[in-house]
Amino acid sequence: MRLTQIMKITPMFFGAVVSLAAIGCAVAAESTPATDAKAEVIFASPEKYSDIRDAYTSTQMGEKAILDQIRDYIVLKAQTVVPAGEKLTVTFTDIDLAGDFEPWRNGQAMDIRIVKDVYPPRMDLEFKLTAADGRVIKEGKRQLRDLAFMGKITNNPRDNLRFEKNLLDDWLKNDFPKDGRG
């Protein structure tokens, strides 16, 4: 390759690298939770949860990814249901994801989460809504269950946590209605 050709390619290459770096920074900024978030999520003793497995023989990394998705979802939803100046703290005490792994299935099929009516999603949590001055506005414990989860329409049928997110949506809608009469 001649020097003039290299000199023409270099600015294009440099531009492409800068563009990719900018895109990477934008994506990182979107996925990083804001420090001034309206919600805080705590997972109390997740090693004791009924079922947060990512496979029949689960991994800590897979379980952490599932909990991170639940945390991120609540933080996102809190932006619309928690009034300005208030903060929602949610502490999960147990989670049982919809479906289960059936060990009697052969080979890799035993690592597929089978979703049936007999395996409904369950979440036990405690919550506290506080004002900016620290005053408790509302608090409680909830045992979230949805035995009719298979019959509901979901926003994203490809989301592995769609049933759990529907359960959380129902809870937020009931406890934190938009008209403020929760």
Image (cartoon, rainbow, N blue to C red):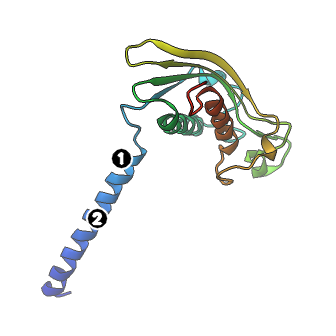
Q: In the image, what residue occupies the spot 83% across and 43% down?
A: 116
Whether tag 1 and tag 2 are in contact, CB under 8 A, the answer is no
Q: Residue furthest top?
A: 135
In the displayed structure, 71 sits above or below 133; it is below
Q: Residue 34 sits in which quadrant?
A: top left
In the displayed structure, 84 sits above or below 165; it is above
Instruction: Pick the residue in front: 91 or 129.
Output: 129
Under tag 2, what secondary structure?
Answer: helix
Q: Nearer the viewer, residue 160 or 34?
A: 34
Residue 105 drawn above or below residue 70:
below
User: Viewer-proximal residue, 109 or 159?
Assistant: 159
The structure residue drawn at horizontal position 81% and vertical position 46%, both measured from the top left corner, is 151
Q: Amino acid at mark 2?
A: Ser
Q: Please state which of the two labelled residues, at mark 1 or mark 2, is closer to the viewer.
A: 1
What amino acid is found at the position of numbered circle 1 in the picture? Ala
Residue 139's spot in the image, x, y percent? Answer: 57, 15
Can you tell which mark lies on residue 19? 2
Counting other residues with Cα less than 10 Å from the Cα at mark 1, is it few (<14), some (14-19), or many (20 or more)?
few
Which image quadrant for residue 66? top right
Q: Is residue 29 left or right of residue 2?
A: right
Image quadrant in which the C terminus is located: top right
Look at the numbered disc 1 and give the secondary structure of its residue: helix
Q: Which quadrant: the N terminus?
A: bottom left
Find residue 29 and name its label: 1
Q: Position of residue 55 (x, y in %)?
A: 69, 42
